């Protein structure tokens, strides 16, 4: 087959495709998806009233959101020091709690560690041999699947855990220097669903004198990345620590593998030059060492797939300035951001992937800082793939309130989100003429932060930042913030965690139930049906929130002869479902009932009932179809009713297509039937052209024009909607233009058919 023939088939298949986006309905580990969340649908959130619900807790850990028992309902999971608490929906109704033996637990993830299809809660203690506990929730109560010591013979002061696959997890534990121990050490242990499987006794250590106080610290926002950084086909664990003193004091990035039986360090990158080291301290927490650097963020930052993945990390260069550095997979330095200046302030966040530059396809990274001198927030962003003159951008604002010093020790976490559809000019500093950009917003302890104005070229030269604003202010202030679609409504709400409470901030949005579009019944119920005739029905289901929808119908409802079609599969809103029955029993005033729902309300149905009669004589299938706009008027033969107004149904092509769909037993609906007809017609025309020795390119172009005409005809006949029409026409025109361009630029235009 020629490449034109292959292109034709691919094109014709493309017209059957549908794409969709969604919000984040779960959050199972800190930093998932590079701290970049999906579209959060927050246009409705800004400027509207909201409701707040709260429960008292004592925690510094971020809440997680997951469906723990596969009932299609999310739970909110909180580690309240030594108690795991489980809440349901916006009212924070308590489902269960489970007390663990240690005094404090330092890290938690949600992961299906044993591969049984059920998510487990995995947590590690920051004392008592770093006890690891693995919990399940069965819909009624917690039960402990396993517990074992993560470390042997000592109790760390901080831990991090992460899993990358079934029975493949690691525990990273920090052991500070004590009077009996002259080393600061970072240990790493591999574990599965039942026990520790392997250990590196000393991942890294620093020998100190008896009077030297030092510590190995984790970032304030602890996150272990899981990526195949070196293109070896195997994901590695990647994390950072900070050594506070000595010649090797600074940031250390570890790349570690756990093959299930052994743990080994593949690489360590040390950043010791230009890193700020405090002159006096006693431990990580008291001197906020975790805010001197960030977690590492690993991705294809340079756009090349052949050299592995690059690492980006933020760190303090003085007590009041910070920067971001990037490194190749081999460990050498790639770049620093900004190149000339440094950003102002103390780091108060993790590093997050974002959409900042207009030509990088959202392959950018950002860190948030706060300057106590000028009381401004400074968002520093960089990229490695832009064509702009500068590969760094800064944005600033005066915050709506200041976080307390104690709070900043904990988790001022940011996530990049797409919350508000605003496009901004990015003209200054770009080689493209007047580009526009819909940049990321950021959820943070301050609320939803938006970029309001990009830097001008002069601003970039002088180091003057662009402008930030707060689109929605966090009403709880000193709180870690997570945006999540907890209720699976298609719209995110805000979870805010303070040191004393968890808050659920609800925007009062509620997801609507699915409803009826149009229903057709063949033969019409306006006349008696003939015994043993086939009965074909279709029901269009719509949902204002674009949720997936389904339908079913029951003939002879409540009778011993009841016929139930069963539920259709969930499909896109606007789908028309078809069902076939047999009127095999005479009856007066029988009931035909239609049911519809959506995947957000699968236990709550909308219904519509029609009465019918069956006798020895009457209408047979195909002798009259009624199309009804649901719920007011019963139509006569071949009428369509909307409200109390009925009009004659003269669209015989629509009726015939629906009858053919039912008669063939396809039950795919009018839109899919029309697209299937277009596919068959296109293939037939293409083959006919080739048989007449028309070139493949011309044949393909002819097919494209015919398909556009068929699309317009289908739209006119109400077979297809606006979305399908516009999408497929754009694809048609794009492919036709490529073929015409190929024809006029010297490509082969002859040929006698498919090869």
Image (cartoon, rainbow, N blue to C red):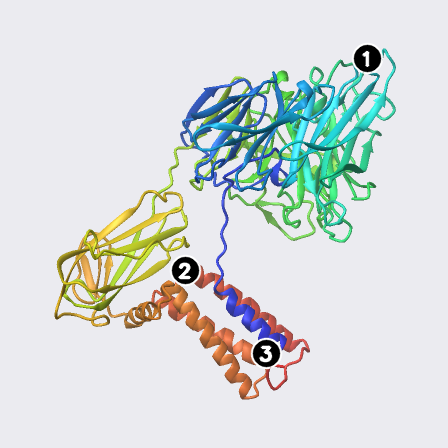
Which residue is depicted at the point 66% across and 50% down? 359
According to the image, label 2 marks what residue? 722
> In the rendering, at what x and y percent does residue 675 appear?
43, 68
- Which class describes the residues within 10 Å of circle 2: few (<14), some (14-19), or many (20+)? few
Tell me the tag on residue 180. 1
Q: Position of residue 537 (x, y in %)?
A: 27, 62
The percent coordinates of residue 651 (x first, y second) are: 28, 70
- Residue at (24, 70) in percent of width and height: 650
* Above or below for 706 versus 342: below
Q: Name the image quarter holding residue 36.
A: top right
Disc ID at residue 427: none
- The span from disc 3 to disc 1 (Cα, nearest Å) is 81 Å
Question: According to the image, label 3 marks what residue?
Answer: 697
Q: Quadrant of residue 592?
A: bottom left
Asked whether 605 or 688 is in front, the reply is 605
Query: Between disc 1 and disc 2, whose residue precedes?
Result: 1
Q: Secondary structure at mark 3?
A: helix
User: Considering only vertical position in the picture, is 176 above or below 313?
Assistant: above
User: In which quarter of the view is residue 453 placed?
Assistant: top right
In front of the other: 44 or 330: 330
Decide: marks 1, 2 in contact (CB < 8 A)? no
Counting labels gives 3
> How far is mark 2 from mark 3, CA to CA?
29 Å
Q: Is residue 345 left or right of residue 571?
A: right
On the rendered image, what quadrant is the C terminus found in? bottom right
Q: Is residue 458 visible?
A: no
Distance in Å between CA atoms under marks 1 and 2: 74 Å
* Mark 1, secondary structure of its residue: loop
Among the two numbered marks 3 and 1 on one chain, the one whose residue lies closer to the N terminus? 1
Q: Nearer the viewer, mark 3 or mark 1?
A: 1
Measuring from the top left, give residue 50's x and y in whole percent: 41, 29
**Which secondary structure, mark 2?**
helix
């Amino acid at each position: 087959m020629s490449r034109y023939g292959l292109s034709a088939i691919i094109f014709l298949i493309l017209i059957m495709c549908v794409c969709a986006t969604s919000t984040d309905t779960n959050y199972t580990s800190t930093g998932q998806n590079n701290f970049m969340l999906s579209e959060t649908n927050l246009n409705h959130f800004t400027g509207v009233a909201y409701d707040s619900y709260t429960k008292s807790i004592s925690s510094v850990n971020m809440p997680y959101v997951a469906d723990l028992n596969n009932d299609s309902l999310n739970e909110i999971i909180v580690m309240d020091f030594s108690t795991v608490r489980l809440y349901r929906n916006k009212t924070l109704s308590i489902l269960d709690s489970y007390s663990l033996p240690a005094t404090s637990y330092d890290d938690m993830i949600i992961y299906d560690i044993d591969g049984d299809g059920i998510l487990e809660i995995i947590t590690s203690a920051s004392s008592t041999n770093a006890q690891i506990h693995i919990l399940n929730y069965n819909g009624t109560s917690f039960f402990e699947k396993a517990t074992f010591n993560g470390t042997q013979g000592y109790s760390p002061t901080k831990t991090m855990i992460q899993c990358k696959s079934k029975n493949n997890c690691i525990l990273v534990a920090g052991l500070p220097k004590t009077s009996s121990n002259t080393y600061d050490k970072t240990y790493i242990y591999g574990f599965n669903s039942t026990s520790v499987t392997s250990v590196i006794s000393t991942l890294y250590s620093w020998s100190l004198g008896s009077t030297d106080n030092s510590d190995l610290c984790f970032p304030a926002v602890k996150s272990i990345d899981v990526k195949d950084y070196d293109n070896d086909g195997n994901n590695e664990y990647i994390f950072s620590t900070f050594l506070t003193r000595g010649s090797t004091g600074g940031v250390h990035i570890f790349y570690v593998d756990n093959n299930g039986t052994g743990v080994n360090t593949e690489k360590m990158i040390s950043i010791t030059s230009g890193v700020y080291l405090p002159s006096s301290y006693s431990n990580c927490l008291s001197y906020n060492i975790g805010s001197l650097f960030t977690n590492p963020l690993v991705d294809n930052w340079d756009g090349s797939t052949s050299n592995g993945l690059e690492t980006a990390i933020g760190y303090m260069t003085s007590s009041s300035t910070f920067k971001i550095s990037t490194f190749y997979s081999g460990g050498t330095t790639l770049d620093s951001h900004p190149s000339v200046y440094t950003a102002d302030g103390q780091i108060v966040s993790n590093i997050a992937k974002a959409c900042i530059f207009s030509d990088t396809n959202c392959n950018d990274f950002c860190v948030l800082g706060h300057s106590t001198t000028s009381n401004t927030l400074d968002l520093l962003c960089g990229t490695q793939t832009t064509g702009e003159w500068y590969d760094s951008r800064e944005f600033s604002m005066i915050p709506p309130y200041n976080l307390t010093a104690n709070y900043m020790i904990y988790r001022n976490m940011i996530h990049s989100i797409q919350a508000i559809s605003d496009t901004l000019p990015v003209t200054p500093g770009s080689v493209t003429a007047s580009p526009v950009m819909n940049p990321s917003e950021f959820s943070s302890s301050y609320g939803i932060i938006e970029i309001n104005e990009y830097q001008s070229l002069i601003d970039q030269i002088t180091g003057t930042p662009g402008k930030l604003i707060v689109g929605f202010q966090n009403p709880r202030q000193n709180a870690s913030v997570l945006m999540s679609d907890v209720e699976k409504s298609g719209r995110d709400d805000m979870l805010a965690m303070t040191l004393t409470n968890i808050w659920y901030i609800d925007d009062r949005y509620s997801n609507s139930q699915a409803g009826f579009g149009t229903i057709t019944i063949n033969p019409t119920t306006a006349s008696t049906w003939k015994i043993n005739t086939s009965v074909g029905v279709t029901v269009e289901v719509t949902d204002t929130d674009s949720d997936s929808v389904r339908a079913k119908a029951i003939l002879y409802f409540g009778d011993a002869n009841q016929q139930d079609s069963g539920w259709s599969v969930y499909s896109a809103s606007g789908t028309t479902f078809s069902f076939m029955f047999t009127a095999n029993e005479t009856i007066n005033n029988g009931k035909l009932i239609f049911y519809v729902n959506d995947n957000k309300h699968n236990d709550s149905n909308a219904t519509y009932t029609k009465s019918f009669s069956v006798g020895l004589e009457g209408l047979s299938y195909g002798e009259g179809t009624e199309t009804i706009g649901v719920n007011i008027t019963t139509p006569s033969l071949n009428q369509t009713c909307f409200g109390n107004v009925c009009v004659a149904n003269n669209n015989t092509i629509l009726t015939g297509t629906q009858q053919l769909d039912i008669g063939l037993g396809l039950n795919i609906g009018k839109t899919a039937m029309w697209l299937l007809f277009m596919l068959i017609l296109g293939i037939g025309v293409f083959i006919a052209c080739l048989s007449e020795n028309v070139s493949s390119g011309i044949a393909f172009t002819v097919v494209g024009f015919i398909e556009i005409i068929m699309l317009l005809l289908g739209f006119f006949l109400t077979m297809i909607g606006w979305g399908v029409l516009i999408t497929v026409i754009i694809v048609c025109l794009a492919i036709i233009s490529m073929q015409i361009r190929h024809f006029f630029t010297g490509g082969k235009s002859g040929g006698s058919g498919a090869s």
